[in-house]
């Protein structure tokens, strides 16, 4: 029997048992769809996070007290503005140094209010983090030096507080203190369900007075030279260690952050793929099971085929092709569902999903392989059946 | 001998010499055939009779190359069975033997024409030619109007006629029918029997038929009687029904 004919025989057999074929496929469909969907979500999340970190601006160095590690608790910062000045001297250009002291606070305007993140910053922030203003102006050196009560609003905050008025020039009330709005940021949009425009920038000096603290949470440096960024980081850490003996500081680059995040998300994607892979395996066992049942149920058919001239190989190939067809069709259906699901998730939820070719190829390859692996035993059993015994079966 | 059109009568289609078949059942040897010697000639019409358990079906399976003897010499279509591999034996079945079973053994959910065409699939005949030949064969058994019916849409007699068409679509030299009318009522059975006899006469295919019906056996040209795994009588009866 030619192979093309064998495919037809297998397809006919599947069609003759539509319901069972469908149920058998279901395991594979679910397995493949979940592989594709979960890997898409993992990959999408990773891409989004990477874009975001890269979007912070290039050659960025973040200086924080403690160790920037997965799972390490944030330490209370001993950093002050004097330390920031010292870092500026190490860098050689204070305009390349930004700071933040952040806290959640309720911001009011008239009878409207919004709970948001209020960040005390230097006038250098737009340079260091590549932020742009939609309207008005950013903080100036003199705003910072004098602790002037002026604020730059994120796009969302501006919309909430001033839905039908221009925000710039208006008064707002931050934790009971009046500030004047001098600018509104260009929107950044959402990522991973977090609104990145939900923030208010005020001079760090004003923030410190507002929160009754001298501290600075973190320092960010835009390194002048990418190649010597690690060296600069070490010198900054050394300087800070000298100023605060006994406290640990870390200076991390974007690459390092990306590396850590990439590792976490890579593991996450792997775990998701593995879970989905297990369901695919379970689907494969289901195929094997049904094929064995099918061989038993169709024993008389096998006997008859042999009686009219089918060789053991013809029967074996027929059942193997049936298994491969089942899992391949299931695999393709699962792929379509997975891709559709990923598009749907990306469209209607904040979870990003990016379908990757390798996950499609892998899922399809695995499902076809599952068909072969789990089809071999039933196929061999069918091929070896004694026709006389098979014909007598009930 | 007026009904015989077999042009090569006298040439052995199947030859069995001292053939035995012993089953192993939980370590116990069950001898189903104990030294059977017989020849089926081209165009022959043989009735195989004997009590239940005497080894008729076992012999039929051997004659059709569906099973192998445990002893003796069996030659089908000029080829010694013991020297053939499983695929070679399958091919021999496909080319020289047609089986008709008591239980029809049609593929369910498969049309009559596709059932009849099945042996041609394993012969490598193309789809269109298969359908043509199967349809023509169904016409010869009087089912030209039932091509696309499925077995569950056919009566028992029609199903057995489909099975006969399937057995003959490859133009075999021997048609082996094991109680072909056993599942049919007497009228339908008689019609099926008539069909088998007509095909034997028309196309010269040798017909070996197991039957429990003495009247039927009397119509065959030869009557082989078995008991306890051996042939106890092998007599020519002829159209006049000459007994031994
Ligand atoms: N697979 C088997 N294993 C063991 N013994 C078997 C097997 N097949 C047949 N036999 C035995 O071989 C003997 C002959 O069986 P067979 O089926 O050939 O009889 P039969 O003449 O066709 O009977 P019936 O008229 O009832 O169909 C019986 O005793 C049976 O029990
Ligand atoms: Mg029998």
Image: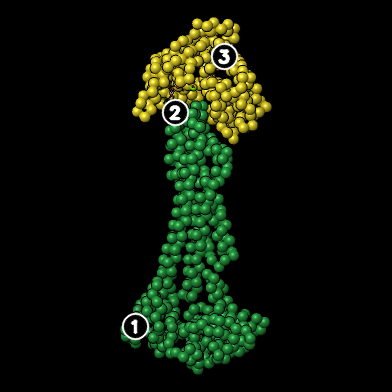
How many neighbours does mark 2 have within 10 angstroms: few (below 14), some (14-19), or many (20 or more)?
some
| Viewer-nearest residue: B11 or A186 | B11
Mark 2, residue position: B87
Picture quadrant of residue A374: top left
Is residue A372 placed above or below B228 in the rendered structure?
below
Q: Chain of mark 3?
A: B
Number of marks drawn:
3
Q: Are marks 1 and 3 in contact (CB under 8 Å)?
A: no
Which quarter of the figure has residue A239? bottom left
Q: Are marks 3 and 2 on the same chain?
A: yes
Q: Is residue A107 visible?
A: yes
Within 10 Å of disc 1 (Cα), the crowding (few <14, some 14-19, many 20+) is some
Mark 1 — on which chain does it sit? A
What is the spatial separation of the Cα atoms under label 1 and label 3, in whole angstroms?
109 Å
> The chain shown in yellow is which?
B
Relative to A101, say whether B110 is above or below. above
Query: Which residue matches tag 3?
Result: B216
Of mark 3 and mark 2, the one earlier in the sequence is: 2
């Amino acid at each position: 029997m030619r192979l093309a004919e064998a495919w037809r025989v297998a397809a006919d057999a599947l069609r003759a048992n539509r319901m069972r074929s469908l149920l058998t496929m279901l395991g594979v469909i679910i397995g493949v769809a979940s592989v594709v969907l979960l890997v898409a979500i993992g990959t999408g999340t990773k891409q989004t996070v990477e874009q975001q970190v890269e979007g912070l601006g290039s050659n960025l160095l973040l200086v924080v007290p403690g160790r920037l590690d997965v799972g390490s608790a944030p330490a209370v910062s001993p950093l002050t503005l004097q330390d920031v000045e010292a870092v500026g001297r190490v860098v050689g250009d204070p305009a390349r140094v930004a700071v933040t002291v952040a806290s959640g606070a309720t911001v009011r305007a008239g009878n409207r209010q919004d709970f948001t993140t209020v960040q005390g910053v230097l006038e250098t922030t737009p340079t260091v983090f590549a932020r742009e203003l939609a309207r008005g102006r950013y903080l100036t050196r003199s705003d910072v030096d004098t602790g002037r009560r002026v604020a730059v609003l994120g796009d969302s905050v501006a919309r909430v507080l001033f839905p039908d008025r221009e925000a710039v020039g208006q008064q707002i009330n931050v934790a009971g203190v009046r500030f004047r709005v001098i600018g509104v940021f260009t929107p950044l949009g959402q990522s991973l369900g977090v609104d990145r425009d939900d923030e208010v920038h005020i001079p760090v000096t004003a923030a410190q007075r507002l929160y009754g603290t001298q501290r600075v949470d973190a320092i960010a440096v835009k390194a002048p030279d990418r190649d010597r960024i690690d060296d600069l980081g070490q010198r900054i850490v050394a300087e800070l260690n000298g100023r605060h003996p006994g406290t640990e500081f870390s200076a991390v680059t974007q690459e390092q952050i990306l590396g850590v995040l990439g590792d976490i998300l890579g593991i996450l994607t792997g775990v998701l793929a593995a879970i989905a892979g297990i369901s695919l395996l379970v689907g494969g066992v289901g195929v094997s099971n049904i094929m064995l049942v099918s061989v038993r149920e169709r024993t008389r058919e096998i006997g008859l085929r042999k009686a009219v001239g089918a060789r053991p190989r013809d029967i074996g190939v027929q059942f193997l092709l049936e298994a491969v067809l089942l899992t391949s069709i299931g695999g393709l259906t699962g792929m379509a569902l997975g891709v559709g699901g990923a598009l749907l998730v990306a469209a209607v939820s904040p979870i990003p999903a990016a379908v990757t070719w390798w996950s499609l190829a892998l899922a399809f390859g695995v499902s076809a392989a599952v068909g072969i692996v789990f089809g071999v035993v039933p196929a061999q059993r069918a091929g070896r059946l004694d026709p006389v015994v098979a014909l007598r079966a009930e | 001998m007026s009904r015989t059109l077999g042009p090569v009568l006298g040439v052995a289609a199947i030859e069995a010499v001292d053939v035995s078949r012993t089953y192993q059942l939980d370590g116990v040897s069950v001898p189903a055939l104990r030294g059977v010697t017989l020849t089926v000639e081209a165009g022959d019409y043989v009735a195989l009779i004997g009590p239940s358990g005497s080894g008729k079906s076992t012999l039929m399976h051997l004659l059709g190359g569906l099973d192998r003897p445990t002893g003796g010499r069996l030659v089908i279509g000029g080829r010694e069975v013991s020297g053939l591999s499983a695929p070679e034996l399958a091919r021999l079945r496909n080319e020289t033997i047609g089986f008709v079973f008591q239980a029809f053994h049609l593929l369910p959910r498969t049309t009559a024409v596709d059932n009849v065409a099945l042996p041609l699939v394993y012969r490598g005949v193309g789809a269109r030619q298969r359908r043509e030949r199967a349809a023509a064969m169904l016409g010869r058994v009087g089912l030209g109007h039932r091509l696309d019916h499925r077995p569950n849409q056919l009566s028992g007699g029609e199903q057995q006629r489909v099975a006969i068409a399937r057995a003959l679509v490859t133009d075999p030299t021997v048609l082996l029918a094991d109680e072909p009318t056993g599942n049919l009522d007497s009228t339908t059975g008689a019609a099926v029997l008539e069909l088998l006899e007509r095909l034997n006469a028309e196309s010269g295919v040798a017909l070996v038929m197991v039957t429990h019906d003495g009247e039927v056996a009397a119509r065959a040209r030869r009557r082989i009687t078995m008991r306890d795994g051996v042939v106890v009588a092998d007599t020519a009866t002829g159209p006049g029904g000459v007994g031994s």
